[in-house]
């Protein structure tokens, strides 16, 4: 998947969006092209360079509602690692694990969900980590902040100068 880095008007990274959304924003005049890939996108009456980095023309205030609970955000919080054995099987080899199982009243929320590889999740089954004699690497917690791009994301070289940790 070809993706585009979306920057605020102040050049702060906001998020990664699909290139199709970036083209739409370009045509609507809501963003300006900062960096482009080598490919060209052709339409009936328009040819544009494939956007790699775009910048909003108007400043967008960030939402203060906190980090959205989603599978990918849980994986990112846990650095794509099993919280029991430390393995990194990739997103297709990871699962959600309820620390306190749902059958014991556990809820699906930030403080009760961790990332587990399939074998560890099967070994733990419907028990708590203590009952299964398994140790969590770190407790489940709601993150205060989630970066627009994480080191686990596939980064294009044109993004690195806009990311603080990408310049090192």
Image (cartoon, grey):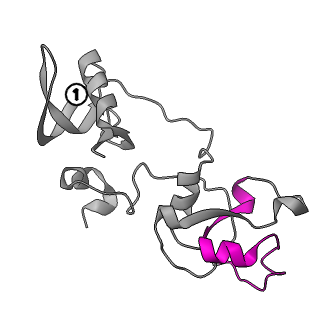
Q: Is 14 placed left or right of 129 in the picture? A: left
Task: Identify the element where label 1 is drawn.
Answer: strand
Q: Please state the extent of the stretch shown in magenta in the rendering.
A: 109-136
Check the image and report above or below for 154 versus 14: below
Which residue is the site of mark 1? 32
| Mark 1, other Cα within 10 Å: few <14 / some 14–19 / many ≥20 | some
User: Looking at the rendering, which quadrant does residue 110 occupy?
Assistant: bottom right
Q: Quadrant of the image for the C terminus?
A: bottom left
Residue 78 can be seen in this image: no
In the depicted view, which residue is nearer to us: 121 or 9? 121
Residue at the outermost bottom position: 133
Residue at the outermost right position: 104
Q: How many marks?
A: 1
132 inside magenta stretch: yes
Residue 153 can be seen in this image: yes
Check the image and report above or below for 97 versus 43: below
In the depicted view, which residue is nearer to us: 109 or 101? 101
Q: What residue is shown at x 35% (from left), y 43% (from top)?
A: 12
User: Looking at the rendering, which quadrant does residue 17 occupy?
Assistant: top left
């Amino acid at each position: 998947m070809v993706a585009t880095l979306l920057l605020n008007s102040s050049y702060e990274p906001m998020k990664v969006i699909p290139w199709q959304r970036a083209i739409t924003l370009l045509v609507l005049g809501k963003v300006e092209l900062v960096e482009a890939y080598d490919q060209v996108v052709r339409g009936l009456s328009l040819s544009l360079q494939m956007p790699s980095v775009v910048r909003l023309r108007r400043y967008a205030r960030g939402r203060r509602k906190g980090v959205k609970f989603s599978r990918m955000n849980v994986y990112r919080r846990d650095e794509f690692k099993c919280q029991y054995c430390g393995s990194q099987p990739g997103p297709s080899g990871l699962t959600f694990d309820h620390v306190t199982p749902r059958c014991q009243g556990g809820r699906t929320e930030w403080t009760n969900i961790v990332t587990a590889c399939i074998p560890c999740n099967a070994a733990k089954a419907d028990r708590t980590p203590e009952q299964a004699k398994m140790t969590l690497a770190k407790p489940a917690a709601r993150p205060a902040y989630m970066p627009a791009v994480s080191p686990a994301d596939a980064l294009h070289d044109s993004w690195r100068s806009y990311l603080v940790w990408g310049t090192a």
